[in-house]
Amino acid sequence: MNRDRAVEIQKLLDKLKVAARSDKDLPIEKFSELFQSIQALEGSLANYGATVTDPKAHVDLLALERARRKLAVIEALEGVKNPSYFDEFAATLAEHPYALPKALFEPQGKEVVTIDFPNNLARQQFHKERTGLALAILYPGSFTYRYFGVPIKIETGQWSQTLVAHLRMHTLSPDPIFSLERNGRKLDVYKPITLRARQVDEVNPFICANCLSLAGLDEGCFHSPQVRRPHRLPSSSPITQNQELRREEGKSIELRAPLDRVISTVTRLHSMQVGTAVLGFERSAFNHITIVDYDPPIGVIMETKGIGFKINVPDQFLESLIHMHSLVRDVVTQFLAEQISDRLSENGMPSYHLEPILSGLIHSVGLDQQDAGIETIAQNFARRDWIDDAVQSTMNEGAAYYERFDVQQRRLRPLYEAVARIQLDWPIIRNQIKAILLHSLAHDLLIAGCITSGCLPIDLEYIIKDNEIVLFDATDGGNGVTEMIFDFCSSEESFKVTETEEDIGKEKIYYPRHFDEAFAELLLPCQQGVAERIFHRKMAAPDQQDIRNRFMALERQRESYSSEYRYIEENGVENCFRASIGYHVSLAQGLQLREADRLKEVLSVCLHGCPDCLILGNKCNEGGFLEKYHVSKVITDEYFRHITEDITVEYSSKDAVIEALLSERGVTILSAVVSKGSEARNAEKLEDRISELRGKRIAEKFVKFAGFWVDCPIGAHQIRYCAMVVLR
Amino acid sequence: MRAYLSSKKHVNCSGLLVFPRNVLAQDQLDELKSLAQLIQRQVERLSLPSDFKELLNFRIVRDFGRPGREELASIYESRPDIIVTNTEALKRRLMNPVPHQVYREGIDFVLYDEIHLYYGLHGAFVAGLNARLKTLVPNIPVFVGMSATIAKPEKHCQRLFALQTRPRLIDDREDILQRWVVEHHVILKPRAGRPPLGVVVDTTSCLLHNRRDGVANIRHLPAEERPKTICFSGSLDTTGRWTIDQNDLEFFEPRAIPRQDFYRGYPFYYIPASRPDSSPSFGQACISCHDGKDVICSFCNYYRAGGCWWFSQDSGNPGSWVRIGGGSFGSLHIPNDNIRSRRLTAQEVDSWQGTSIYDLYRTEVFHFIGRNRIRLDEVDADNLIATNVLEVGVDFRGIREIVMYGEIQSPATYKQKCGRGAREGNTIDGLFVMTIVPPMPLANFYYRHFWRLVNPTLSPVPLEPSNPDSLKSHAFSSVLDYLARRDINVFNVIEIREDEVGIEEEFERALNVLRTERPSVEEHVREFLRNTGNVDETIVARAVSEAEKLLIDLSEDIELEDVKKKFVNWVFTGSRDPHVLRKLREKIATEYDSLSGYVQSTTDIERQFNEALEALERTLVKLDGSYAEASSEIKRLTEVNS
């Protein structure tokens, strides 16, 4: 603001005063209120105008910054025993990124945050860190050994009652740097300027077994001191969300069949601005996890490079899933888990209560009933008469199977009542399926990116948008990963997936060289999950090494877990996911804790993603604890079947049909189904058919074998052998 | 010949050999030196003039770690033929005038070993370093990149070495490969619910005891011949915990009385006869098994359950425990047949004082009295639990097992780690590679596709040399390179100890150069950027200005206890004298507090103004439509304001 602007404001205020005085319709109270406001502004305007237009103010701001840097130099010296070279202390004086790199593997980052150790006698008080790094390992609530060789905690203040950490002790930017939407709410994100830290004196501090807060530090809690136990410092991880703020698009390409139906275009993003927000943290101890939210979230904006994938999710596919009742019930469960999780902290309950509360709900709403479709579930849910039963069931479960279950009915009931007000119908579940599918595909794309570029998951990040998934370099300025993914996105040569043995006795190891091949491979049915389904459905084991290995392990385990395995056989492997949540099944069967735990272990059959295929752990945008409610391997399996439906034919199809498909799309999947004993030889017949086709000439090209896999869809008691052939 | 010799009085440096790890650099330096000695001995036999013989001798020097001032000066004054270094050292040398006496003469070639390790942002920083080096030397050195585990190396080298054209690829495909080592590869995935590190500790113990066939029998062997193991984990924290847990399981902490009542740990698993059991599969069946009369694990439930360690001869027998230490704390013992592990990270390598790399297979035995740790003795270690510090290049003889735990980045990194074992070609026991998979996405992926690890296909590695942060940082540093090339010593401020006035003059000279030779300095920065292919005039101007600002800050006069010195001098006086440092801190802190108070009051005034503006706007909004215009005008002014 300059002096002219101050004069302009004053003129406006004068005009306003005249107008108010001559306004006969203005009630005296409002007149008085208006005049008070005008006078307050006039008072502050005089000071403000003088301060802001005073050149000294700017000079002093610069001088203040210089003095702060000099102090930082002195503090840096206190940490260096025998300084010899300029770069040992000068880095703290320079303006990032125009500075000497401390180490060649540490990014400079244009944003830095000061870690402040107040009252840290005889030790360096301020440490400058790159904001990106601070948000990854020095977020409020984290513990680090980075300084002085002793455990340090970044402060949070007390959060145990509301599970919200108000970051008042830290200095944040005065204005939000960007906003993002989460669960329908708009959140303003602030940049951390100074984060306050303190030393943890105890190696094994007392931790509250109820809320996992540390006793004796800044956290404290209102729970009984008797539930505090000494424990090594708990592990934690930040919950982050990325938001695209700006992009500059570059070249776009299309993928080869069959992935052209999944991803319509792949676009290089030469330059993009991404806001990364840390929304809170997960802390785990005593086999429990507590999620603490920040108020407000903190974050940083970085300039990087990326790659955008336009995803095609046909409505027809989403609609077709309404008939897959077990899948729909799983998605309803995942949806309700999200809703309960959102409301837990509002009711002052730690996140680890999610399972027993969800378990009570599953039982009471009838999600564990076989064959119940969305209509039945929605009707049951809308009646709200399940609340009493859910409360009772959760309390019983808590009493029977949890060492310390401090959920009170007076808190549980309002939570269920709040959940009961949620609208639950097919359109909502259909959107949820789409969201889960996109999230699952984002995980697949990220893993495929790591495989193709040889990077680690920490080098890459993802953003999920309406019909697009963006991968970006997780380094300010870029690290070359997405560029490499784009360079190796697709090839002119024929498509290939999975290990293929071209000649018996000649070992040929396949490795996906191109991104689309690695991604397609991740989309194939997980052979471990397939083996589990076939085993639990008591079907004959296919002659595939992966599946046979898993069969052997399952057979060994069945020797010791016979009754648990019987339960799965009787209730269907497709119902395992819901049954594995909490202990409602064990409660209904009156099992003891040990038996109940054994059942839970056996029920963790891969349906919605295990680490073998989809799970990213703490790397997931939803955090490791809630991840399983946001991804689904069963949905991606169905999706893959849907998008390859038009290129899939029976192995016994006529040559003309196969050749026409190959000519048109360049790729065909031949399948052989085995659902009863008489079809047992179909797998061999498929192999014979492939042998016949291989090498056949079609329009100047040759038929080539490109991959083989076994499938066992969740909705059908059958084994499908699939072989892909391509034209080259 | 005389004429030739006189023309060659100042032979330039032949090669700069850059290694990614200090252990590897030391290993290669040792090899090179022995090769040079061999050549020297041959040359000595020839009847040549002594100065010509001198010319034919290689001068190979080590420049990594933290050489002292005199040592560094002698390294570069000796006009070395070959300098063995690493990127961290090179980063400092470019800004230091001392090595410029060598750079000024030119360097024939720059060799980077294990180039696949320079990827991502780290690779970008190293690429920037090479671009700066090229700006400083009069010739363009030949850059050589070496790797056995990279696809498309030409593109990678072009970026890493800041080259305008694609480099030439020389491979050894025509060499005849001989399979002369037996390798066993096993990958384990802990069952759900089992702590992965517990599985790692148990399986490592099981593998090593069963492969050794009597650890006590090999104790007398020299370190080179003794069977050894390397365990890898990428996490500093995990290597620490793994070492502690492994040594705990193996009773490595000395005890006054050997344990008799084993309830856990390696002896627990040994010899089924030590466990009273009525199982018919025990007793005679076990003896048959051990004599090789039976098929291992065919029937025995204990073996199948992991309860029997069939091959192990290590029982932790109390009679076999050995005394440790001098007896100051009484008679303390450790078993002689336990597996002893030592942690090895970059930090330990940097502080390592050994003469041979086999000295790394020695570990200290500590006795704990309360929280105090007292060193008792040093004994042979069987196992190194290392970070990636040993991943490349270090070739120990006698490595029989490689154990890995952690995320698997790529088949290439797996192969690199496996490559540390059985270098001498073990065709009898073979190399045993065991991988334990943590719950991480890529590790699980490779668990499913294990063959891809064992028989890897090479893959290219990502590198982004145009990362703007890296470019700006290097552009700034290149201003200091320029000063160093002009022989201005602002970098090597240790000189202050002897010549405070001289250093102050150097800072003044530096500032003077930046002011009077600005176009030339800018051209130097521009040339660096040109080498990277990213000329940006904003970066050029800003880099020079920021460097100047930094030197001004350091050259600022500060009066303390009636003595006036430049800030940089106070800093160094303070580093030797805590009293001075405290006084300096107090003076600057007072200045900071007073400025901070002023700025705070300015901020308060600004906040009050904004609050008053918002309050008025709210009041106007509440009034009826006749004040809407004033409200929108206020809003406009607020926006202008913000």
Image (cartoon, coloured by chain):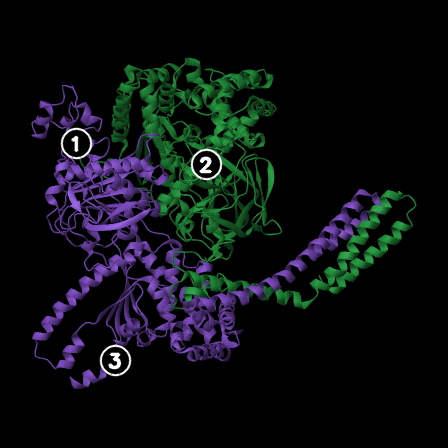
Chain colours: A green, B purple
Using the image, tell me which numbered label, if any, was put on residue A207.
2
Q: Chain of mark 2?
A: A
Query: Where is residue A254, by image quadrant?
Result: top left
Separation of residues labelled 2 and 1 (CA atoms) = 39 Å
Which of the image's four quarters has the C terminus of chain A?
Answer: top left
- What element does badge 2 sit on? strand
Kindly state the secondary structure of the residue where label 3 is placed.
loop
Tag nearer the camera, 1 or 3? 1
* Residue B10 numbered tag: 3
- Camera-nearest residue between A63 and A703: A63
Q: CA distance from mark 1 to mark 3?
A: 68 Å
Q: Is residue A682 left or right of residue B603?
A: left
Up-down relation of residue B9 to residue A138 (above or below):
below
Residue A54: horizontal and vertical position, in percent? 69, 66
Q: Please state, as top left, top right, bottom left or bottom right, where the N terminus of chain A lies in the image.
A: bottom right
State the CA–CA distance, disc 2 to disc 3: 69 Å
Q: Amino acid at mark 2?
A: Ile
Q: Residues within 10 Å of mark 2 (few under 14, many from 20)?
A: many
Are the two marked residues, 2 and 1, in contact with CB atoms closer than 8 angstroms?
A: no
Q: Nearer the viewer, residue A45 or B586?
A: B586
